[in-house]
Structure formats: C-alpha cells, structure tokens
Amino acid sequence: MADKLIKSNILLNRMRRLVKSEQLVLSLLALVVGAMAGGGTILFRDGILLVQSLVYGWGEESLHEHLKGLSSLHLVLGPTVGGLVVGIFIYKFLPGQRPHGVADVIDSASFNDARMSTRCGIKSAIASAVSLGSGASLGREGPVVHMGASFGAWLARILHLRRSAARTLLGCGVASAVAASFNAPLAGMFFAHEVVLGHYARTAFAPIVMSSVMGTVITRLYYGSDVAFLIPLHNIQSFWEFPAFALLGILAGVTAMLTVRAIPIVQKVADIAKAPLWGRPAIAGLVVGLVGLGFPQVIGVGYGAMNDALYEAYSLAFLIGLLFAKAFVVAICMGLGFAGGMFSPALFLGAMLGGAFGIIATHALPSFSSGHGAYTLVGMGAVAAAVLGAPISTTLIVFELTGDYQLTIAVMLASVLASVIMDQSNGGSFFQLQLKMRGLSTRWGREVNLLRMIKVADIMKREYVTVPLSEDLPAVRAALFNAPYSELFVVDENGKLHGTITLTDLRNATFDPASAENATAGDVARSKPPVLFRTDSIEKAIRLMEQTGEEHLPVLNNDEDREMIGFVHEKDAMMAYNNALLELQSEERGDAPPKLF
C-alpha cells in the first residue's frame, strides 16, 4: 500500500512538471486554435455555398456551368445586389469601413503585439461569405486566414499571453486556415512562417505544425481526403522544357505586377469620383455581372473554371480572354471594396496564363511539351507566389496536390522568377502594397517595427504631481521639491494640461522675489510643452525627446480634451525597446522556450 502511494505521488509530481512546460502548453493551445480555425473554415465555405444557392440556385463549386442557363438580368443583378448588401454591412459594422484580410494579420503580428479583434474576424468572414456567394470575383482563403488568426489572438488575449506566444498562436490560426483550405498541411505551416511571422524559430515551429495538421484533420473528417483541385497526371517530357518554364515565370511576374498595380488606380478613381463607400461594392458587382455575360467563369471564386483549365478544356483565344477579363474584375472588386482574398484570383490568373502559354509552347515544340495542362499548373503556382509573396508555400501546395517532384521543380523555378520580378517592380507582394498604403512596411527591419509596435500607454508612469493654474509660488516650490524627476505639470480646472514647471523655470522667481510676489503656477509654467498621446509609439517618443532635449514627456488622452494621464521617461522607453528586442532575438533563435505569461 505504501509503495502504491509513493508511486502515485511520483506520477503526480511528474504530471505537474509536465504541465509546467510552457512549450507543451503552447502546443496544446495550438491544437485548440487549429481546431477552431479548421471548424471556422468549414462554416465559411458552407456559408459561401448557402449564399450562392440563395442567389443563383446552385450550391456546388462548379458555378459557371450553372450560370450559363440563367438569364442575363439574373447574372447582372446577383452580384450587384450582393455588393449593395456587403457595402452597407461593411460601412456599418467593420472597423475602418473596409474589409479586413491577410494584410491586417501581418500588421497585427508585426506592429500591434499580435492583437486582433475576434468580432472583426467573424464580421469580415460574414461579409466575405456574402461577397463570394453573390459572385464577387475574389478568393476565399484570405478571409479564413484573417478569421483563423483572430481566433489565435482571442485565445492569447483571454489568457494574457506574452507577445512572442501571442504571435505564435496568431501563426497557428493562419497555418490551420491555409491547410484546411487546400488540404495541404505543409503549405499551411510554411505560409504562416513565410508570410506572417517572417521567421522559422524552433519554438514556434512545433505549435504551428500541430495547428496545421489539426486544421487538415478537421476538414478531412468533414469533406474527405479530396484536394482543392482535381489534378490530372503530368510528366515532364524533357529538361529542355525548363527554359519555357522560366519564361512562363517571367510572364507570371508581369501579370501579377500589372494586376496588383491596377487595384490602387481603381481606388483613386473611386475617390476622385467621390463614390460612397457603402455603394462601391455594388458598382463592382455590376461590373462583374456585365463581364460575366460573356465570361461567366469570372463570377465567384472560380475553382470550377480552374479545374477545366487543368484538364485542357479551353481554347487559346478563350484562355486569353478569361485572363484579361479576370484581371479586370479582380482589380475592380478589390479596388471598390468587395470582401475577399487574392489567393484564388492569383491561382485563376496563373491557370489561364499558363494554359495559354502551354498551348503556344506545345504547338511550337510538340515533342518537348508535357501538355498545356502542366503549364497551367506551373502558371498557377508562379502568379500566386508573386502576388502573395510566398514562393515556398505555393510550391509546396503544388507538391501536395500533385505529388510530382519534377513538376514541383518547374513550379519552384517559375515562382522564384515571378517573385523576383514582383519584388523589383512593385516593391513586394500585394499584402506589402496594402501595408505601404497605410504607411507601414515589414521591410523597415525588426528594430523599427519594435519601436512602432510598443505604445507609450504601455510604458508610461502614472506617479506624477500636478498643480492648478492658480497655485502660488511657495506651494509650487514645495510641490516641486517632492515631485518625481523634479517636474510639475500644470493643469486647469478641467484637468487639461497647460504647461510644465521645472527648477529652471523657477529661476527668475528665485532671483527676483518682488516680481514674483503675486505670480502663480500658470505664470511661470512653460505653456504648450511637447506632448505625446496614449496611442503614439515609443519611436515617436524617442524622436521627440531627441528633438526637444526633454528627458520625459507628458502623455495626454487625446488631442481634444488634452487630459493628462501619465508621462514617459527616456530611460523607460529605451528599456522597453531593449527588453522587446531581447525577447524577439530569443524567439527567432528559438534557443529558449517561449514565456507565456
């Protein structure tokens, strides 16, 4: 009996030590996030088909075949009315009155301490489901990535996890969503590291892998083991084809660059025309419907049309027509605020480009061609890699879909060339362009990102001394003697900051007591001192301190009421930056388990 008790206590102690392993806890949380993101992906896809069945009377993927039997009025009204509903929903319920997507996830991971709104994630998913179900010519992967990331951020927030652990859970949601969308766990895992986190630290690698696998398992239990596309078998006929694959990669980079560049042009035209934000998606829907009269394949996500291209069902002229039609409506839909992603549109453009290129290459050198279906697949990977800035992830998607090593090498070559062209001509991917338009860039380097990520509200001190404007000088001297950092903050009767007083500011009163006999705090204070606001970054704080020579600055609630809520000292700002930098270095090296709390 005593031996059993001793063994039981030993087992309990081991279990306690095991639970205390922060890496294990993070991995378990990753499984939770993976299951949530996988389940959310299923609900999102079914939601698209539900809306699609309500609008077009068809609840299957191959929508374009069904659309051929509908009236022209139905084809035009479907996306137009859907756009109106989406526009009003976004205008009323989404922050910034715009759809949210992958760029917001990168923004959160790089600049916002992995903080995201779960409500915004769910609302954005609803807007995207209605958009895509009613015919928006965009993709379904970006919205589920945003939603999955918001689930990870939510779990990190309620558990009060540290920044590094929160970023990992954010990546877990991304990985699970991508894996669930394509039934491709490797691609999901690498997409999270390559696009969102920007590193492959060992401490983040294992949880993200587990989350990606969990998302795949969830969707396979629901949909089965079928992959996103029905891929026919292809064999590379000759290594002499690789120059053709390289040329296709160059054309894919140009296609991606032109499509992405067209989006801000559409936005500028809409701004110049002063089109209302809530009405812009309806205009985009009208354009989609009109183009869909000739090319119904551009209405909706377009997976059915991509499968047709993979099986070489389209002629050269039709492939070229679809390429230009799709690029046009994608720029219109994204530029005018329809909710959706760019993953599927990039795959669609690549399929049409690759198919057209393959027909030409096959006719030119039939004995060396693998068939234009192979070029279709290579084109899909190349355009997607350039648009998303994810050559590794897209190459792995093709490998997981085909299991063909030789074809994967071709995709790798084309994807790298396309990505280089996109990077050199456009300065990065579509997501980086979106961030640039918001005044952000992931290319500033980790030091600048850290400075912009940490807010003064996180490090400001609240132990300060204020005096009213009417305070007499003897009382000011007494208060200043006991004030932290020998500085007083002068406020009016409403708590608004009027100015500051230091020992230097009292110098005249000290040497000329007669002139200061009736002086008050308001008379000797430095009015309109340099200030910070609670939402400012420590980058701005440090820069302002360097410009003004101040060692500490008051922090105001906002510029309207100017209520003082704290102050920031230079050493606190530098200490916060140094601690965050050390934490980031440890996270990226993966040389220590992440600190969760």
Image: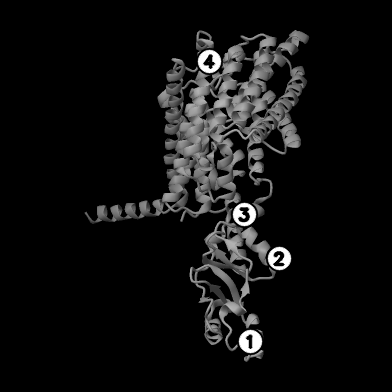
Residue 334 or residue 173, whichever sits in front: 334
Q: Residue furthest left?
A: 1
Quote the CA–CA distance across marks 1 and 2.
28 Å
Circle nearer the N terminus (1, 2): 1
Circle nearer the N terminus (3, 4): 4
Task: Determine whether the residue tagged by mark 2 lies in a helix, strand or loop.
Answer: helix
Decide: few, some or many residues near mark 4? Use Cα within 10 Å; few <14, some 14-19, many ≥20: many
- Is residue 338 at all visible to an observer of this figure? no
Residue 444 or residue 71, whichever sits in front: 71
Quote the CA–CA distance across marks 4 and 1.
81 Å
Residue assigned mark 1: 509
Labels 2 and 3 touching (C-beta < 8 A) = no
Q: Is residue 403 above or below residue 311?
A: below
Q: Comparing marks 4 and 2, which lies closer to the viewer?
A: 4
Residue assigned mark 2: 547
Q: Position of residue 443 (x, y in %)?
A: 68, 46
Q: Comparing marks 1 and 2, which lies closer to the viewer?
A: 1
Residue assigned mark 3: 452
Labels 1 and 2 touching (C-beta < 8 A) = no
Task: Determine whether the residue tagged by mark 4 lies in a helix, strand or loop.
Answer: helix
The kind of residue on which mark 2 rests is Gln
Quote the CA–CA distance across marks 1 and 3.
41 Å
Q: Is residue 92 above or below residue 476?
A: above
The kind of residue on which mark 3 rests is Arg
Quote the CA–CA distance across marks 3 and 4.
47 Å
Residue 387 or residue 466, whichever sits in front: 466
The kind of residue on which mark 4 rests is Leu
Residue at 65%, 35% (x, y): give it. Answer: 430
Task: Determine whether the residue tagged by mark 3 lies in a helix, strand or loop.
Answer: helix
Residue at 74%, 12% (x, y): give it. Answer: 360
Q: Position of residue 70 (x, y in %)?
A: 50, 10
The kind of residue on which mark 1 rests is Ala
